[in-house]
Image (cartoon, rainbow, N blue to C red):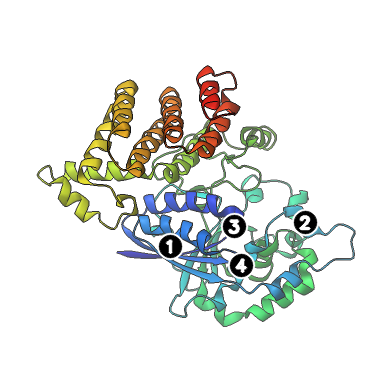
Amino acid sequence: MTELNILLSTNRSYIPLLTVMLHSLFDNNRDCAVNIHLLHAELNEDDLSIVEKTVKRYGGKLCSYRIDVKSLSEAIHKPTEANEDPREKSRLPMETYFRLLCIDYLPKSIKKVLYLDCDVIVNGSLKELYNMDLTDYMFAAADDFLEALELPADHWQRGIIYSHIPETFKYVNAGVLLMNIDRFRQVITTEEIISIIDEHGDLLIWHDQDFINYLFYKYIYHFDYKLYNYFPVYPDWEDLEPGRPVIIHYGGDFKPWNDDYYEKCESIIKVHRGGTSRFARQAKKLYEKYAAFEKAGEIRLIELIDTRKRDNDRLLDSEILRELSNEPLLSGITVGDAIFLRDIVSAIKSGDIQTALDEVFNLAQSEIPDEHAESYLRTAQNICAVREYADGWVMFTKNYIQFLLDKNRDNEALTVIFEMMEIFPDDDELKLLRDQAGV
């Protein structure tokens, strides 16, 4: 089994993006042993628990490293003579520098890592990329966004560093970076890295990415951006395909979780001969698919059970559940629960939302532990959300509110009610539920 050592860095605000990326990574590399090496400076136990839960769900391993940032922070926030610090233009957090400091934190036994930004989605196998031969190189990366769109050399975003790189070499994007850690350790120390940042920080508009290009442009292998670092606005792919491109990078302003995603994409597509609106839409749907994984773990569990049943129709449900005993979602779920939930999934898939609703509601009112009844309702909610059954999602959400009210959990119910009323301000049933909660 291929072992993948994946390097990540994050702060607290990026954890939701990180977990989405992890779902896509593990989902498309189930035949690999994946080790996640997480660099951070501020995560607490609860933050790390969120990440660890996602990693363990797929049988991966998480190693976290708290970075000492005092000297780094002083170097990157050093004021310049100019009134405007050029480094503020890119708005990148300090954590982007952490990949350069990994040589002091990763075990010496690790010779190679694949660094990934949190704003990527993995759409295929990483084995071919990870197994690239870096014997003669320090890094492997793809041509930068500005190179791929063939923007003019004087484009402001290229920054000062471009003038220091010979024309025969292309500037790379460091959001997907295969690193020869062994060789990196041999040529530079973290003290030297911080010293260079301190002395030449005013040149590093794109921070560590500029650093890598400026110092090591001769020792970077260029892999195909069309496969391994593809922006939604690039012109090469008309349609998203299974496994292609392998990595989609929602870099720059092209964030599918923002309301202005399409507007930002269109501005590039029209002005700079970028990609197609169709691909940008498909890239957004792919992101939303993995964003839903975090909310719909129960669905993943049931689909897994169904797959095992298809593989061996003589296998008992109890044997399947025993085989999946390490799955965190199985905590407190019995064989009967699993069979019931599978039936609910089938009903919703067939479009019979009302039958599914009736069954869930009846079970939730029966003599079973509250946490199980709540789990059933939330599971049905999430199934409808993932399957894009809007009516079903509304119905189950209202029933979940009623469940909370019946259990005297009025404050929780009100939170959900107000969230729903932002979407449906004139809904009479929501108003009644709000009145029932005493508001």
- Few, some or many C-alpha atoms within 10 Å of disc 4 (few <14, some 14-19, many ≥20)? some
> What element does badge 3 sit on?
helix
Q: CA distance from mark 4 to mark 2?
A: 20 Å
The kind of residue tagged 2 is Glu
> What element does badge 1 sit on?
helix
Residue bearing mark 1 = 130
Position of the N terminus, as image quadrant, is bottom left
- Few, some or many C-alpha atoms within 10 Å of disc 3 (few <14, some 14-19, many ≥20)? some
- The answer to which of marks 4 and 3 sits earlier in the sequence is 3
Q: CA distance from mark 1 to mark 4?
A: 27 Å
Asked if residue 28 can be seen in this view, the reply is: no
- At x 20%, y 54%, the residue is 322
Location of residue 54 in the rendering, given as x and y in whole percent from the top left corner: 42, 55
Instruction: Residue 141: name its quadrant.
Output: bottom right
Looking at the rendered image, the disc whose residue lies closer to the viewer, 4 or 2, is: 4
Residue 40 vertical placement versus 310 (above, below): below
